[in-house]
Image (tube, rainbow, N blue to C red):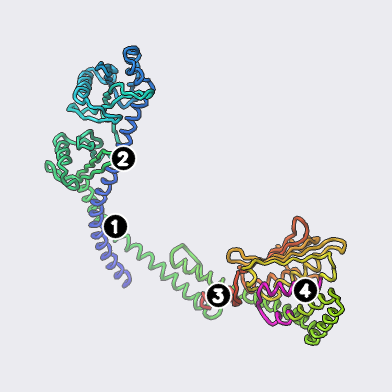
Amino acid sequence: MKIMIVNGIAILFVVLLVTMTQTRMFIQISEEECIANLCMLTNQVCLNFGENQENITDTIYDRTVTFQIPKMMAQYEENQEALESAVTEMVTHSTDYNYVMLEMLDGQRINSGSQYLVGRENFSVIRDNCKFLLDTYTEKTYGSNIWYRLEDGGVYILKDVYDVQPLQYVGRMVVHLKDNPFEISDIYTDNSFMFFDSKGNYLTSAGKELSGTVEEAFVEVFQNQDDLSYIEIDGGTYYVDKDTRDGWTAMGISTMESYHKVEDRIACLAVVFGILGFLLGMVIVFVLLKKVVKKLKQLQQSMNEVAQGNLDSSVAVQGEDDISQLAATFNYMTNRISELLDELIQKERAKKDVEIEMLEYKYRSLQTQIRPHFIYNALETIGALAKMHRYEEIEKAVLHISRYFRNITMNTTKNFITVQQEFDSLRDYTEIYGFIHGNHLETVYSAREQAKNAMVPTMIVQPLVENALKYGVRDQTEKSQICIHAYKKGEELYITIKDNGYGLSEEVVNAFRKNQKIPSREQSGIGISNVKERLYLIYGDRSKLDVHNRECGGVKVTIVIPFSCQEPELETSSVLEELEELNI
């Protein structure tokens, strides 16, 4: 009850505050919107008007050229009948004009005679107006289209006529436009628009029709360049905006009456919705409080069970409200904790298995280093004797063996070495192996400059090269080649090992693709799957190991790890990170 009372007072206060604030804001916005809409509509109407008048003049020019009127006007005496017929054909029901009058260089005039399009009662008026324009405005227009509005309200276009081949002035033309040639969309009919030329002469109007006195008053206001934002005429208040494009000016006009009605409707609707909002809010609060209290008690009980160590405890999720979502999240958290604990145990076991296998490999490598200094000195002595007797092959073999054992001794004590160090050690190993196979084995090492100093885990490449040497070398009668290449691509380091041997069996390839254990063929080596597990333990999902048979024969192994010239820190298990996020 206390919550209901407090919420009821809060809802009432909020509803009143919001209703009053929003009502005032909406009334202010409606006025601002009407001004903004008027500006936008005036801009669009002016743009449409310019395009429309350009289309009209282009149509007149195109039809004039199509009917070869300029050419016939240049030879009027010879083509008088054809010219009269062409002028008549220029005017149709689909054109924006309904009357055309031509004036030749000698003063002769002909017209389209379209009484059935103009109307008999207006034909004589339009004809007299065309004669008036030709008699009054005798200066050349030089290709321009001069627009006129006469006392009868009609709109006329006066222009010169030129023949193109050769270019010569052949006369003039007057065109009468149909009533309202600049119709606009119905969405603009709540506003009025008036159009003026560059000299301020009123041409025509569109949209909502204005009374004669109001229209004359706006013409006077425009010509006097008065403030055109907010004016009063004949007791009416108007918003006014103008926009000018290509010498034409459109003046948009909107009355205040419609906006006052909108303001009254907003106030009434605000009161109605305020009362409904208060009542609805009280009902919702009552229903939600009843459900929330019940669900919170269930959630509290399950939390207490989890706190006592029962991770199998869960809350029944009913609905999609916030408490239900919280219960679903709680269930997911407990299930995820159980999964992460199981995954952590499995990863730790796998990590220990890999570490034990690595220790065994290091131990087997160290077994070959019994009394290493004695071996180094003995090999160097043999090398010196071989050199004295010019046994160059023995000298080279002993030198590679000595250097290889030195590198093995140093590298097995480190977790990470550079690509260059890894390649130097492998080069000695493959050179030694080459003495066994003679000229039938060729090993190629290459590394781009950026990749030479990149850090890689110790003995991560050597097991793969050993496998290539052991199982990727062909018979003694065939040429065998192993290529090891390192390069940087983006933020990753790529190391590829390719051979031209006989390839892997389908069983091994399928096992690798299914992430199954792929042991080496001898107990002294480290399997490919073991290398993949080491990479995952060090770099996580940012590492990749790909093994596949080459189309030209042999096997290609690709290692992809993050590029770094510094020894990276071993990544914390993702499982531990998720547990930390869950505060476990």
**In the rendered image, the vertical position of residue 480 relative to residue 376, given as above or below:** above
Marks 3 and 1 sit apart, C-alpha to C-alpha, by 50 Å
**In the rendered image, the vertical position of residue 27 relative to residue 563, given as above or below:** above
In this figure, which residue is indicated by the disc labeled 1?
Answer: 276
Whole-percent x and y of residue 18? Answer: 27, 61
Residue type, label 2: Leu
- The quadrant holding residue 153 is top left
Q: Which residues are magenta?
A: 407-433
| Lower sequence index among marks 2 and 1 | 2
Mark 2 surroundings within 10 Å by alpha-carbon count, few (fewer than 14), some (14 through 19), many (20 or more):
some
Residue 79 in magenta stretch: no
The N terminus: image quadrant: bottom left
Whole-percent x and y of residue 340? Answer: 59, 73
Q: Is residue 316 visible?
A: yes
Query: Which element is circle 2 on?
Result: helix
Marks 3 and 4 sit apart, C-alpha to C-alpha, by 41 Å
In this figure, which residue is indicated by the disc labeled 4?
Answer: 429
The nearer-to-camera label among 2 and 3 is 2
Query: Which element is circle 3 on?
Result: helix
The nearer-to-camera label among 3 and 4 is 4
Furthest-left residue in this view: 234
Residue, x 34% and y 62% (percent of image)?
283
In this figure, which residue is indicated by the disc labeled 3?
Answer: 577
The nearer-to-camera label among 3 and 1 is 3
Mark 3 surroundings within 10 Å by alpha-carbon count, few (fewer than 14), some (14 through 19), many (20 or more):
few
| Lower sequence index among marks 3 and 1 | 1
Of residues 562 and 521, the one nearer the viewer is: 562
| Lower sequence index among marks 2 and 3 | 2
In this figure, which residue is indicated by the disc labeled 2?
Answer: 47
